[in-house]
Amino acid sequence: MWGGRRALHLGHRVRHEAEDGRYRYLREHWHGHQGKIFGFFMAQALLIILFAPPFVAVAANPRPGLTIWIVAAAGVWLLSVGGEALADRQLARFRANPANKGRTCRDGLWRYSRHPNYFFEWLHWFTYVLLAVGSPLWWMAWLGPLLMYVFLRWISGIPFTEQQALRTRGDDYREYQRRTSAFFPWFPKS
């Protein structure tokens, strides 16, 4: 369900919106070199292996039946997938309005975090930590939220997204950066 929601969201974006500016920038920066573009996407495919250990930890959990940890995991899953879906919908609605071209979304969850969708994506990985309670490999489940935070915060998520936002929205985005938390939702600075 998590992957299906994301696939539908991204499929809609691909069909109804212009090319993502981050990918357009890379294509232009690499002068359309297909080998570099292919390598970029294949490197991402290989990195997915780093995110498999949480699922190994959950699969090794010998606890049968419904436990408080499974109920808690379901709650975290619902909150995180629902929050990410809400953030995606709020941004899509904002971007669909032509009057907002060149402006930064500050509606809904975007008022409290510059990347609420990334925050909820990260939060989602705690589902597997909770599902792994009791597993002999429980510690492996912590690699999910740890690696996802590192990738989103410093490697692939926020840095590329913010570079693109600065290129397209300039001072409006700089003001948004000054007032709004980068990742963890919090009240805007006055």
Image (cartoon, grey):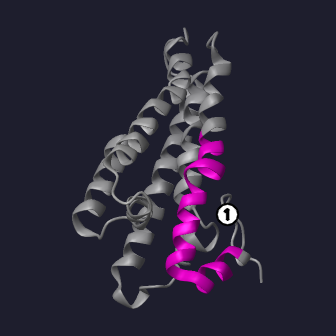
Q: With 99 as the anchor, is 61 left or right in this view?
A: right
Residue at the farthest bottom position = 99
Image location of residue 18, percent across then percent down:
29, 70
**Residue beneath the point at 52% across and 17% down:** 56
Quadrant of the frame with the N terminus: top left
Question: Can I make out residue 1 in this image?
Answer: no
**Residue beneath the point at 39% across and 36% down:** 42
Q: With 86 as the anchor, is 135 left or right in this view?
A: right
Residue 25 quadrant: bottom left
Image location of residue 91, percent across then percent down:
44, 70
**Residue beneath the point at 61% across and 25% down:** 141
Q: Residues within 10 Å of mark 1 (few under 14, many from 20)?
A: many
Q: Name the residue type under label 1.
A: Ala
Image location of residue 134, percent across then percent down:
64, 15
Magenta stretch containing residue 156, yes or no? Answer: yes
The residue at which mark 1 appears reads as 182
Most foreground residue, 110 or 143: 143
Question: Can I make out residue 6 in this image?
Answer: yes
Q: Which residues are magenta?
A: 148-177
Q: Is residue 150 above or below residue 178?
A: above
Q: Is residue 52 above or below residue 9?
A: above
